[in-house]
Amino acid sequence: MKAGFGVRAVFALIGVTAAVAQIVLLRELMVVFYGNEISIGLMLASWLFWTGAGSGLGGRLAARARKPGHLMAAIEVSIAAILPCTILAVRAAKGLLQTVPGEVLGPGAMLLTSFVTLCPLSLLSGALFPVGSRVYPTTASTPADEITGAVYLWEAVGSSVGGAVAGLVLIRYLSSVEIAGVLAALNLMAASGLTVASRPLRYAAMGGVAGIAAVAGFFGWPQHLEAISQAGFWRGPHLVATRNSVYGSLAVVGTEGSWSVYENGVVLFNVPDAAAAEEAVHYALLEHPSPRSLLLIGGGLNGSVAQALRHPTLERVDYVELDPAIPDLAREYFPNQWSALRTDPRVRVHITDGRLFLRTTSSTFDVVIVNLPEPQNAQLNRFYTVEFFREAARKLTPAGLVSFQLRSSENYMSAELSQFLRSIDKSLRAVFPEVTAIPGETVHFCAARQAGVLASGADELLERLRARHIETSYVSEFFIPFRMAPDRVAELEAQIRPLDSTPLNRDFAPIAYYFDVALWSSQFKTGYSRLFHTLAGIDFPTAAAALGVVLAALVVGGRLVVDGRSRLPFAAGFSTAAMGFTMIGLEMLLLLGFQALYGYVYQQLALVIAAFMAGMALGSWLGLRRVASAGMRALATTQVLAAAAPLVLLGLFEAIGRANGTLNLGASRIAFPALAVASGALGGYQFPVASRIFFGESPVSRRAGALYALDLAGSCLGAVLFSAWFVPIFGFLKTAILSAMVSLAPAAMVMIEGSESIGK
């Protein structure tokens, strides 16, 4: 007898809970720590590590349980209680670790916090898979491969639904505590369904849980708990407001007459901040002889737009802001700054990705100013690459220029900072014939489409400032000569002059992102910086050779150490771990590729993630249908396709990137979800096929969670290596080659074992 729809819905809830909880907790951890791909990789690795451990432990518990349904219900009740506590623990960690308000916490604290706080919930989440494998069948003789494949299918279905609902609905309208409350209610209702035999009583119990949740929501208990925990999180400054945006967690904090807006724990801008507002726009506009049109990408709400409008020749300002919640906050809490934007007919506000706007607009500009944070993650790095500079150059008027500012130093410049600035300078010079850099605590880069456009020095900037009758406090006749003193300019040029070995910063080889992370790591213990430098010092041939040796040792060692009867399960387990590694890499390449080409068009990203999980569900379904006839050859073929997948993805990225703007955007709406489905289907198909080989014809046993744990172990290792080493150091192409090597090694082992088993 097959499991009914109600039981399948319970298994789908496993995926929904895991996907939504993972999204919410990663967002919470990003607020506490530095939110780049390396930190996300470490956090995700902690989640996957404990989930894999929970799967292995749950398999042992499930094998001993007399009533596995009750055990599963107990786990779901525990998840309902622990999820909100985990959110509160993550927020409390900041107060425990941060000795001084505003202190930046390093990688050690980041890894420790994520490893400890995610442990209870992840263990329980992982245990649900093998325990569910005992609940799914109605007879103890049902083959283990059929059960684990079916549970994997429904979990993938739930993850797909959960990812889409979380991305498109939940995080838009609910706080983290409210989302935890929704998940808690769903898990309690599922637990009631598993433990209450009588249908009327079961429905009554579910209705009671729903009623309690409705009462809690009506009286605002989750909102009250959210407010208390947020106030404790932002201890020291006065918390004015919080807003849950699809792009991150926003907070408005007040201190001594000024306001600061944070997103994911990183300050976006301060109000008022006359110095930052003046420096953001005046240097760039003064470098142009007579600017009439300006494109300002980000950072206009601190007064930068108002400062730009003081230039009398300026006829049009296009201000692009990615997050729609930021203008909403400005409208409510900074009405003066907002009214300066909305009341001047020269200003046009666009809520979209800055690079996407630049690619699709038909307008041209005299000046393009990138007023964004530094390339501290792959998303921001897109605005400092050769490809972006080329796109900007195509939308500049003949005498147009592009400008941005990055951190620097008045006196001593570290080796990490020099490497970082050299990479940016070399990338600019690869596109623009004339580049200048103005020294200071921040270095202002200006690059012109034609030579002879930029000002010859401080005197010419001062002449333009006086001619335009602009009264300033910081970009003034006193500070401009100081900052642009010939000896200071010459010293900066010597420190950031590109070397022959200086790499270009590219969309698919984001080296400046790595240099920025290395610069960040230098703020902490020397061990962190030394580790990053060591990784960067390993060239690709050495890394590939070392990986090849490790993989060969696994293949050869497995054949020598493992006895003949266990070689097929060993090969299947090796393949599953490698596929987990490949799947996390494919998902990361898909998301980073989408970012590089389009930016955060969030609905599309949510669809890409949901499509990836839907592909896994589709692949699992196909694998279950073929599981009776599929064997070693099918497993080997799947591994070979997985090896080719990242290389195919990269080729398609390059093809889409070369298309024109309109065709490019239209193609992405079809191409990226389709690529995500195809990529996910490989992993989904492989799992039930590998399950048949791993378990043979044996019934469910304590090994039910072992294969799933291997899948998660491979994903855990991949999350760390792809985010912290492969992508930032080697770029997409070499990362795809390394990923292909990992998939081909178990394919070779499977083919060898398969041919020998046929011969016998």
Image: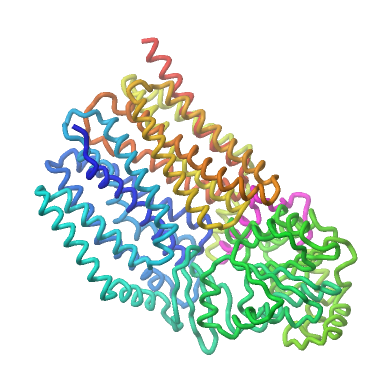
Q: How is the image coloured?
A: rainbow
Which is more toward the observer, 245 or 125?
Answer: 245
Query: Is any atom of residue 295 visible in this view?
Result: yes
On screen, residue 321 above or below 584: below
Farthest residue in the front direction?
345
Left/right placement of residue 156 relative to residue 67 reads right
Q: Nearer the viewer, residue 440 or 19?
A: 19
Say which quadrant the C terminus sits in: top left
Please say whether residue 502 is one of the residues in the magenta stretch: yes
Q: Quadrant of the N terminus?
A: top left
Q: Looking at the picture, how far across and down is residue 287, in whole percent?
A: 82, 73
Q: Residue 462: name its quadrant.
A: bottom right
Nearer to the camera, 137 or 461: 137
Residue 57 located left or right of residue 606? left
Q: Position of residue 161 (x, y in %)?
A: 38, 50
Residue that appears at 78% across and 86% down? 470
**Residue 112 seen anywhere in this rendered image of the structure:** no
Q: Is residue 635 above or below residue 511?
A: above
Q: Is residue 612 above or below residue 478?
A: above
Q: Quadrant of residue 388?
A: bottom right
Query: In the displayed structure, does residue 593 sit left or right of residue 703?
Result: right
Would you identify the image quadrant in which residue 757 lies?
A: top left
Nearest the eye: 384 or 6: 6
- In magenta, the rendered stretch is 496-523
The location of residue 112, given as percent across then percent down, is: 40, 60
Answer whether residue 452 is magenta in the image.
no
Q: Residue at x 26, y 31 (%)?
A: 144
Q: Residue furthest top?
A: 759
Expressed as whole percent of the image width and height from the top left, the position of residue 729 reads 61, 48
Total marks in image: 0
